[in-house]
Image (tube, rainbow, N blue to C red):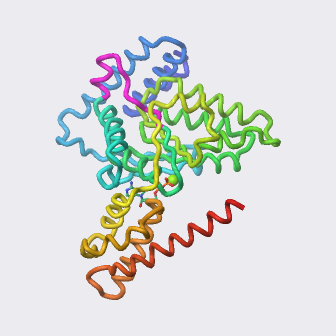
Amino acid sequence: MSTKQILALLNSHIDGDEDQLLSIALQIAAQEARQGRADDAEKLKRLVQKARDQRHVGKPAGGQTPIPLARPRGELQGLVESAYPKVTLSSMVLSDDIAARLGRIVRQQQERATLREHGQTPATHMLLVGLPGTGKTMTASALAGELRLPLFTVRLEALFSRFFGETAGKMRLLFDQIAQTRGVYLLDEFDAIGARRGDPNDVGEIRRVLNSVLAFMEEPNSTDSLVLAATNHVEILDEALARRFDEVIEYTLPDVAAARAIVERRLGKFKFAAKAWPALETALEGLSQGELVRAADAVVKDAILEGASKASPEALQRALENRQTLKGKFRRQSSR
Ligand SMILES: Nc1ncnc2c1ncn2[C@@H]1O[C@H](COP(=O)(O)OP(=O)(O)O)[C@@H](O)[C@H]1O
Ligand SMILES: [Mg+2]
């Protein structure tokens, strides 16, 4: 432990800032772990957990103490968006398989103390793969909502274009925050790392970033932050990278039943009679979850403004067909 760290510990003790004190202790734990002293790291982490648990004794049951809004500090400001999502997994329409896998992640996080007692660690790194609008961002929000954790989002492509040459340093800052502040971290546009390999303007930057990401993924995560990497293109991702994720979840376009469920939920009280649905099947097919939600929203707005108590199936049909046409246009353009 360095003198700097002892000073920081004493200062937070003098200020009565226990959060700060514990967060420094966790940083030291992470450092110990990095230097191969897993036992010491583990002891520190347990003590921090114990201190945190004791603080909650005597507080109202239900764990509903409000978390202060965590904001990225200093240089990370403007690169990382923070939010406290209210959505949960039950607000998503998911296949049984994906629902089960996400449920397992939540459970491992919630019961991580039990896992640790048995020498296990909760899953923390996930790769979310799928076309735009299939629910990757929503999954990140829902996981944060379930765990009552802040959601921090970083768009990697934007980071690369704004800070080319300094990206590796910025990533390091981000990894430090992940180690210090427990939260759900969404590394969006993750393929930016893969896509830019072989870029003629690259002066080893991508390699450095990739290496720092790889190293980071091997480090034990001292705060049990969840790290979610999202990408639309799996094919350009490095295999070495993909192998390091605890879970890889692939999102697909919804089948007709799921599409109907998404639209019906979105229509809410404007939902129309069940017998109208079979005629809508063709229009539902091939649209992403996001496109379905947009079509449903358009129809709900019309119904509100027209003072109708139910949405009309014909209006929904038209809205879905509009989405289909738009989609067709873009597909033609991108295959040129
Ligand atoms: N599984 C789902 N269940 C219900 N709605 C969904 C689902 N997936 C996506 N949506 C809707 O589609 C919108 C776009 O999804 P999003 O998560 O932003 O897609 P991605 O990040 O994969 O591009 C969401 O805001 C949400 O309204
Ligand atoms: Mg997204």
Point 51% across, 44% down: residue: 129
Rendered-image quadrant of the C terminus: bottom right
Point 32% across, 28% down: residue: 112
The residue lying furthest to the bottom in this view is 306
258 relative position to 177: left or right: left
Residue 107, located in which quarter of the rendered image?
top left
Residue 301, compared with residue 265, is above or below; it is below
Most foreground residue, 276 or 81: 276
What segment carries the magenta color?
Answer: 112-126
| Percent position of residue 5, x then y | 51, 22
| Percent position of residue 287, x then y | 47, 63
* Whether residue 14 can be seen here: no
Residue 85, compared with residue 336, is above or below; it is above
| Percent position of residue 64, x then y | 24, 45
Point 49% across, 17% down: residue: 33
* Whether residue 143 can be seen here: yes
Q: Is residue 247 magenta?
A: no
Residue 124, located in which quarter of the rendered image?
top left
| Percent position of residue 149, x then y | 37, 43
